[in-house]
Image (spheres, helix red, strand yellow):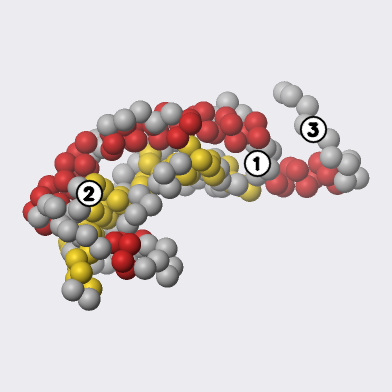
Amino acid sequence: MTNLIYQAIMVTPAYSNALFQATFPIHADFHSRLHGTQLVPAMIQKVIVPSSYPDTCVTLVLTNGARQWMARGTVAVYRHPRDYFVREWREPYEHFYGPSIISTNEAFQLASNTVRRLGYSMEQFATNWSLAVSGPFTKDGNNIPFISYRWQPSDDEWQRSEIHVDMENKRITYIFFPGHIRKEEPKTSIIPETMKAYRERMKQTNGVLTIPSKP
């Protein structure tokens, strides 16, 4: 595998748009497989593009608060806005109280079926790593119907696969794909100017900003 050298770049509107256009089909395919509905631009609240090249880790923030992070040519992390395990600081526990509509066995089946629907086998997703299960929980006599499945090798604390299930609403609230799941990086129609080239150009023009000529 070739080790890429990432360079800091000047992020322009043109480059941001080109990168969004190149990565949107990947985001849309993930959304369709996960939710069974089409992702359209009107559902996107914010697009966050990386400030390095050839990094294509575009993050989408949807209007419902969900986030999709790209990495290694695919959506590597998904987070629903209501997830007990990644709740915002000081968010009250009461926001997560509710009944467990499905059993822990059904929750695991939902997680497994989701991984397969996204195009991967459980062997690819979890490999032969050890599984740790957390939840559901009880606090002050109230049920917190969230369960987490986390696979991790014993010799590498940075590697993991993880998926969370909301057992009340029967939905996936978080997915973290391991580093060995990767696809070809999307290509953009624009190659951005590096920060090094930008600073050199500014020196040559005595600090007067000029637009680089087209090739």
Question: How many numbered discs sit on the rendered protein?
Answer: 3
Q: Amino acid at mark 2?
A: Asn
- Give the side of residue 180 with respect to residue 209, left or right: left
Q: For numbered disc 1, what is the local secondary structure?
A: loop
Q: Residue at x 62, y 34 (%)?
A: 15
Give the alpha-carbon distance from disc 1 to disc 3, as whole Å.
Answer: 13 Å
Residue assigned mark 1 = 11
Give the alpha-carbon distance from disc 2 to disc 3, as whole Å.
Answer: 52 Å
Could you classify mark 2 by the number of other residues whose Cα lies within 10 Å: few (under 14), some (14-19), or many (20 or more)? some
Q: Position of residue 120 (x, y in %)?
A: 23, 39
Q: Amino acid at mark 1?
A: Val
**Sequence-wise, which precedes: disc 2 or disc 3?**
2
Q: Residue at x 72, y 47 (%)?
A: 196
Q: Residue furthest bottom?
A: 140
- Give the side of residue 84 with respect to residue 129, left or right: right
Q: Is residue 158 above or below residue 66?
A: below
Residue assigned mark 2 = 169
Q: Is residue 133 above or below residue 179?
A: below
Which disc, if any, is residue 145?
none
Q: Is residue 141 visible?
A: yes
**Front-most of 207 and 89?**
89
Q: Is residue 187 visible?
A: no
Residue assigned mark 3 = 211
**Front-most of 117 and 204?**
117
Q: Nearer the viewer, mark 2 or mark 1?
A: 2
